[in-house]
Image (cartoon, coloured by chain):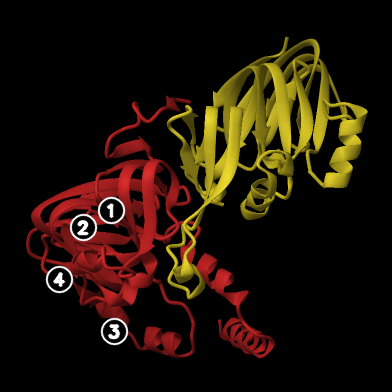
Amino acid sequence: MPTYSIVNEKLLQIDLASEEVLAKKGAMIAYKGAVNFQGALLSGGRLSEVAMRQVAGEGLKLMKAKGTGEVLYAHHGLLVNLLKLTGERLYIESDYVLAFDARLRSGTEFLGNQGGVGGLVRGAMAGQGLFTTTLEGHGECAVLSSGDMIELTVDPNKPVFVDPQAYVAHKGNLSTSIHTDVSWKTFVGQGSGESFQFKFVGTGSVYIQADER
Amino acid sequence: MQTYTPDNLPKDDNINPYAFCVQVVKDFIIRKGKMIAYYGNLRFESVGSNVIDMMISQSFNAPSYGGDYIVATGRGQLILGDRGNHINSYDLEDANMTLRESNLLGFEPTLTCEECVIPGYLTLLGTGKILASSNGMVHFMEPPVRVDPEALLGWADCPTPSYHHDYAYVKDVMSLVATVVGLKTSGEEKQINFSGTGTVLIQSSESNLKGRSDLQSIIAQVSGLHQNDLQALSNNITQRLRND
């Protein structure tokens, strides 16, 4: 299987031994060895996923690297983080996906499926649209973040509240909803500016970054 | 990457240079929009918006900046971040500290916050914790020192500073002409002069905070404007751009 290693906080190295890896289009900065690059039509999912993604406008644009050698990836000076999945499903904004391989299956999730209307509002608030990318399986993936990524654990009696702009991804068995502090003050311009938060309840982890976009 | 639970989050300390966790026991005053996550039972109210923080208004004595700060009430762990700027905390014990308003991220209501005589700066008096963000690490210096106004983060226990204009700049006819016709001179002719004893805080970058929130809040407000107002705003901006 491909091995992922962090060269420095903004640079990722993937070693391939006649294997393939999917990575963000345009993020390859150098490679050694016999590696071929081609567009990845299926982006690690099924054909139906591609159709879904087209309809949803979820912009997971990937490039497939195949062969034997070392490939270096970096993107816009964002920090690179490695996440290990052990069977959970990771929900992540497509902009933040840097690389993954065949061990993980990608998909597109309609946010309305989790949390009903709340899910819709959630997508609209975070500016990521109503669809999000999912990765599922056993293996590693490389995720981008602007500012160090912080993992917050959620357990059933310790929900966590997150600012929509600081949210990067979440994994595990979590249900999301919009938490509001809205009162009449919000509408007369006396609001606290923190009126909408994502509330995560269940068991899993939420990833946030210090840099609000 | 470290995984955090409510039990192992730092208590009133940095999670990383860009994120800070505050243990809120009763109230904490923070700058609007800097909350990135929290555990526990917290509510966010604008300063002076209800009876509870009538008490807060005692400690927030800067009406011109009231709109920029909110009060986190309740119990919980509050994580603050400021667009990837460095965050530092300072503990005051019956002392005073003055900070640039845009860099003041939060403070305990045990402190009293007042407007400094230098516009754009806030003075905090008393005992308690202060959080401030800076573009780059903070450097401490002792007077006598002259500081670039852009790089100045604040000062503690010093007499209020004064502006110092470079002698050559004031005297030199050439630079006077240059200023009148709008040419840029060296850009270093105006400095802030500190004397006496105390500590001066300097950020290690000459530019202001990354991702200024001013712009964000202006853009947010534009959506409420009518056609005519938008036209007026557009004309104003075009005029400004032409002048620069």
Circle 1 residue: B28
Real-space Cα separation, disc 4 to disc 3, in angstroms: 23 Å
- From the top left corner, tell me how far across and down residue B187 is, in percent: 39, 71
Neighbourhood count class around disc 1 (C-alpha, 10 Å): few under 14, some 14–19, many 20 upward: many
Q: Nearer the viewer, mark 3 or mark 2?
A: 2
Badge 3 sits on which subunit? B
Q: Mark 3 — residue?
A: B170
Chain that bears disc 1: B
Image quadrant occupied by the C terminus of chain B: bottom right
The answer to whether residue B184 is left or right of residue A22 is left
Residue at 27% in and 39% down? B12
**Residue under pointer 2:** B109
Q: Are marks 4 and 2 on the same chain?
A: yes
- Report the front residue among B118 and A89: A89
Residue A56 location, quadrant? top right
Q: Is mark 2 in CB contact (under 8 Å) with mark 1?
A: yes
| Mark 4 touches mark 2? (CB < 8 Å) | no
Residue type of the residue flagged with mark 1: Phe
Q: Is residue A168 above or below residue B161?
A: above
Q: Amino acid at mark 2?
A: Pro
Q: State left or right for residue A28 relative to residue A159.
A: right
Q: Chain of mark 2?
A: B
| Drawing shade for chain A | yellow
C-beta proximity under 8 Å, tags 1 and 3: no
Residue B53 left/right relative to B85: left
- Residue A12 shows in the view: yes
Name the residue tied to disc 4.
B160
